Image: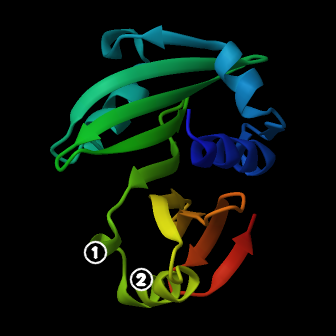
């Protein structure tokens, strides 16, 4: 699991609600309760959400994450162009979150311009992910600087920075 994924799961656990339950779990605790399952073993509404969101990709893996009496389905999809996506689906089939690997050329111009301002001289981009939660789109970009810790910078659709860690 990449640093971006760990950070995103931690952020998601702070905001994520399933039936009013706030998931305050770290990425490590989430994955320790995960069980790989087949599409046919998922509830029908979950299967439907998965099929609607494949976007020409191939289903790679489904994990059922049990938290108290609730189940969150983490679905990994292989997309064309060596990219991938993750769907976070509640047991009722509602799509809670999408994380999609992106290329710099595929992100909106305002975001690309802001990223280029952040990546100076010897810095480089490690990962770019598009995050969609309840229709709100953000771009999570991991930037590597020599002799400094990597940073994850979160950009809004207009190119503004909402956080940097």
Classify 10 Å Cα crowding around label 1: few (below 14), some (14-19), many (20 and above).
few
On the image, numbered disc 1 is attached to which residue? Answer: 105
Residue at x 68%, y 13% (from the top left corner): 33
Residue at x 33%, y 43% (from the top left corner): 84
Q: Can you see residue 137? A: no
Q: From the viewer's perspective, tell me whether residue 44 is left or right of residue 90.
A: left
* Residues at circles 2 and 1 in contact by the CB criterion of under 8 Å: yes
> In this orientation, which residue lies closer to the viewer: 8 or 151?
151
On the image, numbered disc 2 is attached to which residue? Answer: 112
Q: From the viewer's perspective, tell me whether residue 105 is left or right of residue 6.
A: left
Classify 10 Å Cα crowding around label 2: few (below 14), some (14-19), many (20 and above).
some
Q: Is residue 35 above or below residue 150?
A: above
Q: Secondary structure at mark 2?
A: helix
Image quadrant occupied by the N terminus: top right
Q: From the viewer's perspective, tell me whether residue 46 is left or right of residue 20.
A: left
* Mark 2 and mark 1: Cα distance apart in space: 8 Å
């Amino acid at each position: 699991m990449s640093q971006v994924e760990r950070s995103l799961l931690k952020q998601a656990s702070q905001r994520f609600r399933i039936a009013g339950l706030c998931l305050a779990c770290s990425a490590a605790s989430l994955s320790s309760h995960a069980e790989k399952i087949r599409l046919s073993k998922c509830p029908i509404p979950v299967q439907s959400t998965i099929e609607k969101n494949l976007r020409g990709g191939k289903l790679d893996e489904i994990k059922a994450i049990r938290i108290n009496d609730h189940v969150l389905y983490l679905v990994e999809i292989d997309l064309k162009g060596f990219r991938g996506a993750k769907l976070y689906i509640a047991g009722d089939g509602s799509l809670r979150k999408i994380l999609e690997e992106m290329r710099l050329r595929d992100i909106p111009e305002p975001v690309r311009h802001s990223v280029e301002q952040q990546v100076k001289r010897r810095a480089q981009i490690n990962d770019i992910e598009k995050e969609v939660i309840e229709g709100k789109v953000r771009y999570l970009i991991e930037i590597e600087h020599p002799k400094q810790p990597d940073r994850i910078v979160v950009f809004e659709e207009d190119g503004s920075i909402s956080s940097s860690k």
